[in-house]
Amino acid sequence: MYSDVRVKYLIGVNRWLRRATCRVLVGGLSCALIAPSVAAQAPPAAPTERASTPAEAQRREAEERAERGVALAKSGAFEQALTEFRASLALVRTRNALTNSALALRDLRRFVEARAVLREMLSEFEATVPANERAAVERVIGALEANIGHIQVDSVPVGATVIIDGQQRGVTPMDQAVAVDAGPHSLRVTKEGFAAVEASVSVDGRRRSELRVALLTQRESGTLRVREAAGRTLDVVVDGAVLGKTPFEGAVAPGHHSVLLVGEGNLGTAPSAVAVRVNDTTQIVLSAAVLDAEVRIEPSPSNASVALDGVDVGHGVWQGRLTSGAHRLELQAEGHRPWVSQFSAVSGRRELLKPVLTRASEFPSDALASARVYAELSAGLGWSPGFHGDPDVSCGKQVEVASGESQRGCVKLGAPVGFLLAGRGGYLLTPRIGVELTLGYIWLKQTLRRRISAAHDLGEERLYSQDFRDETVAAAPLGAVSVAYRFPWKAPLTLRVLVGLSRMSVYGSNRGTFQSPEGATNPVPATVLSIPEQTQHLWVPFAGPEVRIGLPLSRQWSLDLGVAALLFFGADTPRTARSGFSALSQQRGERRAPIPDEDGSGNLGVASLPREDALGTFLVLSPSLSARLQFQ
């Protein structure tokens, strides 16, 4: 739509030459058509002169808005660009702003409106449009017409109101066909005393769709009375058709209807629901207000029923004005899942909504349908920065290695590594949100080479080891409940939050050569100590998020690659010597071992390792690969 050209802007009262990148849908539409120049409207002031009149300020604002519109169009934000172009036109009408509006409409695939704006520009500026520019615009109009079709409606009896895409477009017999964008459209034909007829019509570019509708007599009816609270006179619109003005009274078919009022400017009401009963009179009083926001809804499929804030407003495209703020949108279509969402209407802006419903074949409507059920199997690595028990803590400290000497607590620091296996079953509450139950198994092992000291009963001086090998293993079956949100993209993205509980078994092993410090008064021969430790079993809760991205293999199968970050809340895990190891004390948290003599025939005394907790609260990162089966 906008080609690579030089664009001349007039900003304030200064003339600048700027380079801009524009995209033109039809080559030959030159830069002059998108430049928001208003130089033709009035000569610029001297460079040092400051505009002081309201007209100059208005012209300057028009330029700025047109410039913002071009910048937005170049970035692909055509809806916002159109808003800026129209705001510029409201201040100062220029042929370039009109043309830019048409180009933005075309990129929004609103071809009929784009053609109308270009024709308006040629008519309004007929005397000033250069011949080459007129030829370029005519080529654009020709390209637009390739995407425009027509709908011609007749009815028996005649005099029926024709509503296309929620907008009243004429009365049968129609004098001329209605121009519409190529594609599907909703059609409603209604006449007082007859049952309304609704249909979906697909129109091709440069084609005319002619329809003849036979209306059936409405044998039963009710009476509807509508008035405006302040007594103002406004059009009464029932199910998209203008039936009269307030105060209104007329016969309508029994059932549920959408009623709104439309007045001058933006005065009116949002759609309201009313139920009319047979042979009864229903009265509704509506309060008109300024509707400061505009909304256009283009559902897919095009025949979907649309409800705004609980009020049915018809099928297919709906366009109208609402008050700014939060609104609820509901869509339904045969063979598709219902669609419900909230949106915000912004004052002074036009919101474009294009909701897409999920096919029932992809997501059955039966609450117990098997397609709601899925299963996953995953396998991955497990890695943790550390168990955050006392061995890890000691690695970050200076420890005494001899009388009066200290060094860093670890010779070699090893992070816990292992694996995580899991099986998961899930149930979809909506097409995207699932609740899940996960069962799995985790195994992690950490090996440290530490500096450590041990007390003994042969004297006051401690024994020291420079090569104490300390291993801790944590293994646990685990179970978790989780909630997952899966984006239905080509490569589905899944976000998951898990909360669970594990039955963790923690066991350790150790071995090191201990000796007395140099110059000890009662030295103990260097001796190797290894104290078998008791396995601990404890409940450890955990929680954390997981992110996965999928590769669909078929309608049922996909492979997912992702990573989980699980926080385990381990605590109170004192390392204790194995029961029955010796006759030594077996109190919780004690690790004691005999010190053998030089020939190994006896024991010199008993050494005691310091009390340490094996685990703290620790994080596990688990990158994994999983297979997902969506049951049909």
Image: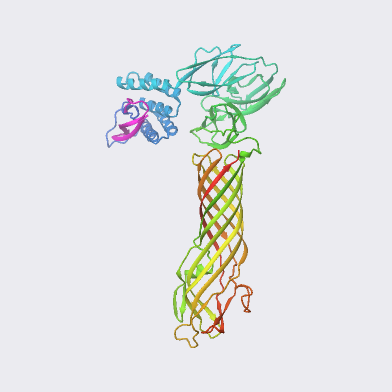
Asked if the stretch drawn in magenta spans residue 9, the answer is: yes
Asked if the stretch drawn in magenta spans residue 595, the answer is: no
Q: Nearer the viewer, residue 478 or 215?
A: 478
Quarter placement of the N terminus: top left
> x and y percent of residue 367 in the render?
65, 38
Task: Write the start and end of the magenta stretch as one range.
Answer: 1-30
> x and y percent of residue 335 in the render?
60, 30
Residue plotted at (63% across, 35% down): 365
Residue 440, picture quadrant: bottom right
Q: Nearer the viewer, residue 499 or 181?
A: 499
> x and y percent of residue 75 in the render?
39, 36
Residue 99, picture quadrant: top left
By secondary structure, the bulk of the magenta-drawn segment is best described as strand
Residue found at the far right of this picture:
279
Q: Nearer the viewer, residue 388 or 312?
A: 388
Q: Is residue 531 above or below residue 43?
A: below
Q: Is residue 216 above or below residue 3?
A: above
Left or right side of 398 for 584: right
Residue 270, picture quadrant: top right
Residue 233 seen: no
Q: Nearer the viewer, residue 412 or 532?
A: 532
Left or right side of 587 for 120: left
Quarter placement of the C terminus: top right
